[in-house]
Image (cartoon, rainbow, N blue to C red):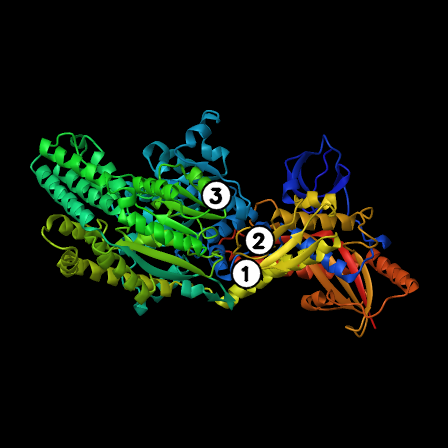
Amino acid sequence: MTMQFKPGALVSLRGREWVVLAQEGEALLRVRPVGGLDEEETTVHTEIEEVTASSFPPPSAADIGDFSACRMLRDAAMLSTRASAGPFRSFGRIAVEPRPYQLVPLLMALKLDPIRLLIADDVGIGKTIEACLILRELIDRAEVKRFTVLCPPHLAEQWKLELETKFHIEATLVLADTIQKLERRLPTGVSVFDRHPYTIVSTDMIKGRGRRDDFIAKCPPFIVVDEAHACAPASAGGNHQRYELVKQLTANPDRHVVLVTATPHSGNEGAFRSLLGLLDPEFNELPLDMSRDLLESMRIKLARHLVQRRRPDIQKYLEVDTSFPERLSMDMSYAFTNDFRKLFDDVLEYARDYVEEGEKKAQKGLARYWSALGLLRCLSSSPAAAIATLKNRVAISEQAEESVDHLGRRAVLDDDDVEETAVMDEEFVGSDDADGLDMRKRQEELVQRLETFKGQQDIKLQSMIQQLKKLLKEGKRPIVFCRFVHTAEYLVEEFRRVGLGRGVEVEGVTGRLPGSEREARIARLTQHEDYLLVATNCISEGINLQNEFDTVIHYDLSWNPTVHEQREGRVDRFGQPRKQVFVITYFGENNPIDGAVLQVLLRKHEQIKNDLGVSVSIPGQSQALTKTLFENMLFKRQKTAQQLVLELEQEPEVIQRQKEWEDRSKLEKESRTRFAQRSLSPEKVQQELDEIKKAIGGSETVKRFVELAMPRFGSTVRSKGSGVLVHIDEQTPRSLRQSINRDQSLEGKFELPLEKGQVYLGRTGQFVEGLASFVIDQALDPTIRFGNTNAAARLGVIRSNQVSDVHHVLVLRQRYQLTLKHGEAPILAEEILTWAFTGNINAPRWLDEDAALALLEARPTMDLPEAVLDRQKELLLAMVADIQVHLDSRIADRAAAVLDAHERVREAQRVARKVTIEVVRPTDVLGVYKILPA
C-alpha cells in the first residue's frame, strides 16, 4: 500500500532529507530538498523509489559556534524561504524588491473577487511590475494556474523578459510568427492555450475572426491587457475589433482582468468609460462630471477598481523616497542654407501641384493629398527619406478610398489610434505611374537636387554631428529618434563614415527588425564603452532603456506630442541610475513645418503638462488639429515660415482644438487626483510592508548576510561606489563557487537601480540563493568545516553584559498546510521564527520578536572556560530534546495570527473562499542559543 504524505511532511529519499510540496495522485510525490532551491524540486514515484517518513535532525554538540554564525544561519534560512506563510506568498519568489507604492495595486486586487482592476499610473512608474506582482501572487496562492498577457506585438518580448528575470515565470510567446510553429507540435483538437499555461499573446493577431473564437473558448481565467487604451472603442477598424475581443473575454463573470495603460483617457471621455465598463458594466453609465456629492457612492466603488497616480503622488510614499531622474529639456536648432531653402520651396510647390492635378483624376485626389503630406514630412527629416518617397511607386488606383485614408493617417499623422504605428515606420506612397510627363520630369529633377544635399551638404546632419561629438565627450549615452527608416539608416551610415569619437560604436534599430532582434542589437551595442543608438519609433514603447541611456534626441519632431512622451519614457523612468536625463528637441529655425509643430503642438503640450502635471493626447480621433496645420502649410502659397506659423495660431479650428485639449487635460488631472488611491490608507500599506520584511527579509537582510557570510569562507566584501566588490578567487572554496556559479570577483548592489557593470544581489538571484543554500548545507552537515569553527552554527553560548539574566534564543522553521479556497488541496507554507525567552523552558517568559532579534546582535563580554562551555552545551541539548511540547501552544497561536493575516488581505466575498490552516509538527529547530549575564 502506498504511503500518503501531506504538504510539509519530511521524507528520506536518495540519501537526503526532503520536504513534501504536494501529493499528486496515488503514487506521485512532489518534493524539494530541505534547505534546497526551487530548481531542485522534483517528482518521484513512490512505488519505484523508496520514500520513508523522516524528521529534522536536532543540533549536536559539534554544531557550536559564535553568535555571528548564529545570525548568519537565521538569515540564510529566511532568504531560502520560498513558500512564505505570510499573506503575500509571492515575495519569496521574485527577483525585485517592489517600492512601497507598487504594493497598492496588489492590495487592491486581493480585495476583489474576481479581480477587475485598471492600473493607469504615469509612464515610468512601474505598471508592468505592479501587474506581474498580482499574477505571481495568485499563482503562488494556487488560485490561478493559467494566464494570458494581451499586448501589442512589439511589447511581447519585453513582457517575456520581465516575467522571466524578475518573477521567475516562463511564458510562451503566441505571435503571428510563432503560432503556426506552436500549433504544428500539437495533437488534433488541442489548442495552444490548452498546452501552454502561461502565454503572451499579440492582441492584433488574436483579434481576427480566424483566431478569436478559439482564444475566447480556451482563454485562461486571468488576463492582463497591456496598452488597454487601444482596446477602447474610439473608432472603427482594428480598434473596434480589439474592444469586441476584450469585451467578450470580460463577459465571463469569473475571469480576473487587469487593464494596464498610462493614457486611459487619450482625450476621449467616452473611450475611458468604455474601458471602465470592461471592469463593471455599471461604469458605462458614469457621467462626465464625477464631482457631484450625489455620486460619492459611485466614486467609492470606482476607487476600488482604479488606481491612477502621477509621479508627485508617489515620489515620497510612506517616507520612502523613490528616485525618479530630473528631466532637463533643451532646444537645439539648425538653419536652412539659401540653396536648401530654395529646394524646400520647390518641393513644396511640386507637392501642391501634385495634389491639385490628382483632384482632377478619379480615385487619386485623396491618395495624392496624403502622399504630399508624407513627402513634406520626409523632406523635414532627411534628403534620404525625401528621395525614397519621390522614387516610391504604387498603383494607387487599386486602393479603396477608405484604405488609402486609413494608410495616410497612420503614416503621416502619427495617429494614436492605429496599432501598427510603432512598428510600421516606412514612408508612405510618393507618386503613381499615371503621372504626366511634366510631373515626372520635375520629380526626377528634385531627386537629383536632393542627392547633392546628402552628407557634407546636409546642414541638419552636420549640425547634429557636432552636437553628438560634444555630448559623447561629456559621457552622455544618447538615443537619436527619427520618424523614418530611410533617415535612420542614412544617419547610421553617415555617423559611422565621419566618426563621432574614438571607439564610439553606432547602431540603428528600425521597424524592419523583428522585436527580438531589436533588443539583441541594443544589448550588443551597449557592451561597448562608448556608443550611440539611432532608432525609429519602433522602440518608443515597451523596451526599457534606462540602464543604458540617459539622453533622448528628437531628430525628427513628431506630429503627435504623445510620441515624444513615449520616446522620453524609455529612459526617464524608475530604475534610471543617473540623477538627470536630458531631452533635446532638434528643429529647423526657418523650417515652416518644424515651426508649426513646435509652436502649435509641442509647446502647447509642454504648457499643459507644466500647468496641470498631466500629459494628454490631442483630442479628436482624426487628429484634426494636426491635419489643419498642414493643410494650411500645403495650400497657402507665398507665405514665409514665420507668417504661416502666426496665421496657424490664429486659425479658429486650431484655437478650438487647443481649448478642447486644455479642457480634457483638466478632466484628466481631476481623475488622477481623485484616484491616486486614497481608498487604501498608507497605514495599511505600511502594515503589510512590515509583515513582508519580517517574513522574508528585505535588501538590508541580504546585505548583512552577504557581508557576514563571504568573509567566513575566505572572501572579502568592501564598498565600491554605490555598491560592493565581492572578491572571489581560487582560494574561495570550490563547492561555494559552484553553488554561486561564480569563479571571479563581482561588483554588486543590493538595491535598484544598477549602474553599468553591477550585478543585482537580490534574494532570488543565483549568487544569494546559492550562498544561502551553501550556508544551510554546511550547518546541517557536521563533516563540512572551514577553519577551526563552524561558519554557520546551530548552537551558541556567550556571556554578555547586554543582559541581566539568562536568555535563550530559538531559530525555528515552522511549516503549515494552508487551504486558501474551499475544496482545493492544501499547499505548503513555511516561515522562519526567531523567539526568545527568559526563565526555565517549563515556565518561559516570552519576549516579543523584535527583542528576540536584538539578542542575536549581542556580543560576548568575556570568554567562557571550556568546562563551563561543555556544561552549557549539555543543558542546551537536553532542552532541545524536550522542547517540542513547550512550543505547541505558542505555535498554535502563531498559526491563528497567520490565518488572520490571510483573511485581512483577501476579503472573503464568497463562502467558497474560506481560508484554513493546519500546523505541521514537529517544528524544525534550526538553532538554539544562550546568553548568560556577565
Residue placed under numbered mark 1 in the picture: 904
Q: Where is residue 725? Give x, y as percent.
A: 63, 55
Q: Where is residue 642? Give x, y as percent.
A: 16, 58
Residue 926 image-quadrant placement: bottom right
Please identify, in this view, whether the residue under mark 2 or under mark 3 is nearer the observer.
Answer: 3
Q: Where is residue 292? Give x, y as percent.
A: 29, 68
Q: Could you tell me if residue 425 is visible in this image?
A: no
Residue placed under numbered mark 2 in the picture: 91
Q: Are marks 2 and 1 in contact (CB under 8 Å)?
A: no
Residue at image position (20%, 45%) is 376
Please identify, in this view, whether the residue under mark 2 or under mark 1 is nearer the observer.
Answer: 2
Mark 1 is on which residue type? Arg
Mark 3 is on which residue type? Ala
Q: Where is residue 57? Give x, y as percent.
A: 80, 49
Q: Could you tell me if residue 668 is visible in this image?
A: yes
CA separation in Å, label 2 and label 1: 17 Å
Q: Are marks 2 and 3 in contact (CB under 8 Å)?
A: no
Callout 2 environment at 10 Å: few (<14), some (14 to 19), or many (20+)?
many
> Which of 756 and 73 lies nearest the eye of the viewer?
756
- Image height of 602 relative to 227, above or below: below
Residue 648 image-quadrant placement: bottom left
Q: Earlier in the sequence, mark 2 or mark 1?
A: 2
Which quadrant holds the N terminus?
top right
Callout 1 environment at 10 Å: few (<14), some (14 to 19), or many (20+)?
some
- Image height of 611 relative to 412, above or below: below
Left or right, residue 558 beside residue 540: left
Residue at image position (11%, 48%) is 635
